[in-house]
Amino acid sequence: MPNDHDITCKFWDALRSDRTMFLGLAEGADGHARPMTAQLEDEGKRGDLYHGPIWFFTSTDGGLYQQITPGARAMAHFVSKGHDVWATVHGRLTTSQDRAVIDRLWNRFIAAWYPGGKDDPSVALIRLDPDEAEIWIDASSIVTGMKMLLGMDPKADYTNKVAKVSL
């Protein structure tokens, strides 16, 4: 039976592997989240848990980048490729063009989006400092499906599959 720590570890492992989050402002602006590629650093890891930040490459002329103001709050959504981990993450958003961070996170996948490379003046970062999340772990199984077919209540199979955690 997983506990909050186990569920949180599954989330970070899935995000490190799958990387795509829908990121948007929690309030105001245009109200739209955008699919963005999450970048995690080893410096954010303490023990077996990651604590942030989550970085996203963007452009200085990107809509979300331009809408981030001091104190901006984010809501990010994540679904793993296998659809076995879902999460909603809340936290603080800031923008950056810190060359040291860009150098640390730069890779060939990011480079494909910037013809001018790291020296492109529009290369920018959005930083999400997560503070809380609600994480769901898939409890679906053949056994659960059979229970439902037999008229049994499947809710017990979902017990301890959700965690509300501080990040």
Image: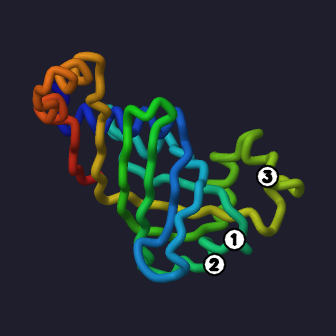
The CA span between labels 1 and 2 is: 6 Å
Secondary structure under tag 3 reads loop
Label 1 or label 3, whichever comes before in sequence order: 1
At 16% from the left and 31% from the top, the residue drawn is 154
Name the side, left or right, on which 100 lies relative to 159: right
Tell me the number on the disc at residue 66: 2
As rendered, which of 152 and 15 lies closer to the eye?
152
Number of numbered discs: 3
Q: Residue at x 29, y 41 (%)?
A: 136
Q: What residue type is labelled 3?
A: Trp
Earlier sequence position, callout 2 versus callout 3: 2
Per the image, label 1 sits on a secondary structure element best described as loop
Image: 89 above or below 145: below
The amino acid beneath tag 2 is Gln
Q: Can residue 56 be seen in this view?
A: yes
Label 1 with label 2: CB-CB less than 8 Å: yes
Disc 1/disc 3 C-alpha distance (Å): 13 Å
List the residue tagged with mark 1. Answer: 62
Front residue of 151/92: it is 151
Q: Which residue is labeled 3 in the image?
A: 113
Q: Residue at x 67, y 54 (%)?
A: 102
